[in-house]
Amino acid sequence: MIVSLRTPEKIWLEMNREKDSCDAIVSMDDGTVYTALFVTFDYLKRQLHLNQQMTRMMGDMPSVRYAVIDTPHILVDDLSRDTIEDTIDALIAQDVFESHFTLVTEEGEVQTPDSKRATKEVAAVIVQEVLVIEG
């Protein structure tokens, strides 16, 4: 098994207003940048409730609780900096970090429908606008 020798250089975190999810941007020592969303069980419950409310408003549709997870989400017990950093370290140690985070690419790079990539321009905006959680 080949294990990645890259290590996180900087981690930026932005907590959502409901305090049940947190965007993470990770800058590695080789200059690559990745992003993912860390969520709690409360986030999933909120998504179930919101979708049920939507189905109730759609007339003949049955009221149903569901959640669709379409971007990388990492479920954790809490959103403390320690939990998120320890999770990132565990994913790197298990050599699965890249399969759970989205690689941030060069601005304007062509994307394929099945790729998990964001542009550096998007990441730069997120980094500039984030609420950085200090340890």
Image: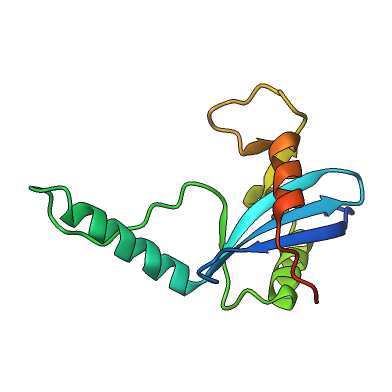
Q: Does 91 sit left or right of 45 as displayed?
A: right
Residue placed farthest to the left in the image?
60
User: Please, is residue 110 above or below residue 68 in the view?
Assistant: above
| Residue at the spot 76% in from the left edge and 59% down from the top edge | 12
Q: Does 80 sit left or right of 58 as displayed?
A: right
Q: Position of residue 27 (x, y in %)?
A: 83, 51
| Residue at the spot 64% in from the left edge and 53% down from the top edge | 36
| Residue at the spot 16% in from the left edge and 59% down from the top edge | 63
Q: Does 74 sit left or right of 107 as displayed?
A: left
Q: Position of residue 46 (x, y in %)?
A: 38, 67
Quadrant of residue 102 in the image?
top right
User: Please, is residue 108 above or below residue 92 in the view?
Assistant: above
Tell me the colour scheme of the image: rainbow
Asked whether the viewer can see residue 2, the reply is no
Q: Position of residue 34 (x, y in %)?
A: 73, 48
31 or 100: which is nearer to us? 31
Which quadrant of the rendered structure holds the C terminus? Answer: bottom right
130 or 72: which is nearer to us? 130
| Residue at the spot 16% in from the left edge and 48% down from the top edge | 58
Q: Position of residue 117 (x, y in %)?
A: 65, 37
What number of labels is visible?
0
Asked whether the viewer can see residue 83, the reply is yes
User: Please, is residue 54 above or below residue 115 in the view?
Assistant: below
Quadrant of residue 83 in the image?
bottom right
